[in-house]
Image (spheres, rainbow, N blue to C red):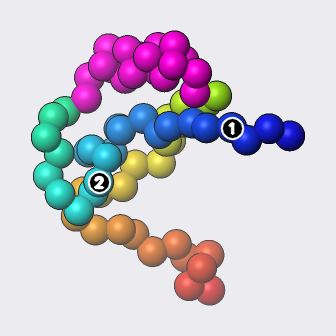
Amino acid sequence: MPLQFGIWAPVCGGWLRVINPERNWSISDLVELAVQADRVGYDFYYIPEHYRPPAKVLFSYLMIA
């Protein structure tokens, strides 16, 4: 299996959650980012389906148990 590369869509407030985001990404920005990623040869484009609050990370009850 060849090595594959992909990127995450910045939908949780920016690339790094420890700093304030420099911009808010619209849906059209995310689509354009996906098109550009495909154009330059990335293999996949992740869009997270779980959203986290910007300041705190919630604990997983499964990991606590």
- Report the label total: 2
Residue hosting label 1: 4
Give neighbour class at mark 1: few <14, some 14-19, many 20+ (Cα, 10 Å): few
Where, quadrant-wise, is the C terminus in this rendering? bottom right
Looking at the rendered image, the quarter that the N terminus falls into is top right
Disc 2 on helix, strand or loop? Answer: loop
Residue shown at 44% from the left, 16% from the top: 36
As shown in the figure, which amino acid type bears the numbered disc 2? Leu
Task: State whether residue 49 is above or below residue 40.
Answer: below
Residue 56 in which image quadrant: bottom left
Above or below, 10 relative to 62: above
Q: Nearer the viewer, residue 52 or 44?
A: 44
Q: Is residue 42 above or below residue 17?
A: above
Residue under the point 68% across and 37% down: 4
Q: Which residue is mark 2?
A: 16
Taking the spot 19% from the left edge, 33% from the top edge, the residue there is: 24
Q: Residue at x 27, y 57 (%)?
A: 17
Q: Around disc 2, counting alpha carbons within 10 Å, would you say few (fewer than 14), some (14 to 19), or many (20 or more)? A: few
The picture places residue 43, in percent across and down from the top left corner, at: 64, 28
Q: Main secondary structure of the magenta part?
A: helix
- The alpha-carbon separation of the residues under discs 1 and 2 comes to 23 Å
- Compared across the picture, whether 20 is left or right of 33 comes to left
Is 34 in the magenta? yes
**Residue 61 inside the magenta-drawn segment:** no
Give the extent of the magenta segment: 25-42
Q: Name the residue type under label 1.
A: Gln
Helix, strand or loop at label 1? It is: loop
Furthest-bottom residue in this view: 65
Q: Position of residue 26 (x, y in %)?
A: 26, 23
Please indicate whether residue 23 sits to the left or right of residue 7 in the image: left
